[in-house]
Amino acid sequence: MTTVRDEAPGVRAAPIPTWFGVGGGAERFARPSDSYALAELVRTEPAGVRVLGDGANLLVDDEGVTGLVVALDRLDSIEALDGATPAGTVRVRAGAGVKLPKLIGWAVRHGLAGIETIAGIPASMGGAVVMNAGGRFGEIADVVRSAQCIDANGDTRELPASELGFGYRTSAPVGLIVCSVEIELQRVEGRAHDELRARHRDVLTYKRETQPMGDRCAGCVFKNPLVDTERVSAGMLIDRAGCKGLEVGGARVSDRHANFVLVDPKRAQAAHIIELMRTVRARVAEAHAVVLEPEVVIWSERPDPLAPR
Ligand code: EPU
């Protein structure tokens, strides 16, 4: 069953759930139970839908958004696949709504290596593929074999990784909705399994020691920019521009890692986070002559939400 909650035009439903925990609602909201129901919704919505993953990298403007928002949290199955794979490997299919930490925990428990490198990054599998989630130790593109996607007509296609166009924090399925992902992991046993558990712990420890990890801040706010030919840490640039601790209303630049915004749930509004992002971007441009590009996706009815209001 698909639940579609309709509101009279102009009236917004409850806030869209995001890690920032701020922002408005959706004019209409649905949680399809499987990829068929999702495809049916897409077919009946010619103007297109907005897709909600785990809401970890998403900032919804205070006024909310028009149209239909589709949450994929019920596409949450994890399944090891039978069939021929290269020796020592196992293929796993995960629904777009599976949370990355849950899949990684499952893989580590079952002695399947390769995805522990991105532990601690907040995302759903669908969102992780669309943004090619990653960090210092790896990115999701390292393990993805293919993704099942739905196009704007509601038709389903399986795209191999080579057609997913992975790049730095991007992939190419523009206009496509990822509904499940097939990944290939290495089977490890005995001592190698202990080493896998230790690697998983080490990645999480690194994240805990260097970044604020909690549910009132999302992932990194800006992408690491290309300076000459190298990616440079946006957090380092923001830090060197003196922005740690900078506050707008209920939003504050983390003292631990400057590419994170901490939110005070009692006071924060989306407008505060947006204003803080604008200020940080201006200070970094002034200090380093580098224009930061947001990694956080902003849902807004404004054409350029980061433009001054
Ligand atoms: N640094 C500072 N000040 C700061 C933050 C960082 O000086 O406020 C320095 C660090 O000391 C280090 C360097 O900058 O020398 C790099 O820092 P870090 O290892 O934290 O990596 P990053 O490039 O800032 C990336 C990803 C993170 C991921 C980490 C670790 C992006 C935009 N960020 O950050 O991903 O967790 O590597 O793997 O790619 C995310 O995608 O949401 C995210 C947080």
Image (tube, grey):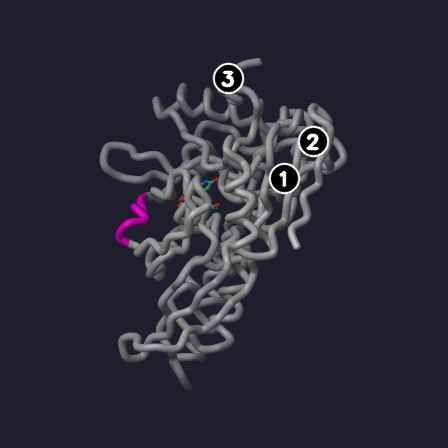
Q: Along the line of sight, which residue is nearer the eye, 227 or 31?
A: 31
Q: Residue type at mark 1? A: Phe
Q: Between marks 3 and 1, how big is the CA–CA gap?
A: 20 Å
Closer to the camera: disc 3 or disc 2? Answer: 3
Which element is circle 1 on? loop
Identify the magenta region.
162-167
Residue indicated by mark 1: 20
Q: What amino acid type should be assigned to the residue bearing mark 3?
A: Ala
Could you classify mark 1 by the number of other residues whose Cα lies within 10 Å: few (under 14), some (14-19), or many (20 or more)? many
Q: Is residue 108 depicted above or below 283 in this figure?
A: below
- Residue 43, compared with residue 199, is above or below; it is above
- Mark on residue 307? 3
Give the percent coordinates (x, y) of residue 110.
48, 77
Q: Are marks 3 and 2 in contact (CB under 8 Å)?
A: no
CA–CA distance in space, label 3 to label 2 = 19 Å
Q: Secondary structure at mark 2?
A: loop
**Residue matched to label 2:** 268
215, above or below 236, in the image: below
Q: From the image, which quarter does the C terminus lie in?
A: top right
Q: Position of residue 37 (x, y in %)?
A: 57, 52
Q: Which mark is residue 262?
A: none
Residue at figure coordinates x 73%, y 28% from the top left: 8
Decide whether the magenta segment is chiefly helix, strand or loop. Answer: loop
**Element type where label 3 sits in the image:** loop
How packed mark 3 is, by other alpha carbons closer than 10 Å (few <14, some 14-19, many 20 or more), is few
Front position in the image: 156 or 271:
156
Q: Amino acid at mark 2?
A: Ala
User: Would you say 134 lies left or right of 264 here?
Assistant: left
Identify the image quadrant of the N terminus.
bottom right
Which of the two labelled residues, at mark 3 and mark 1, occupies the earlier sequence position?
Answer: 1
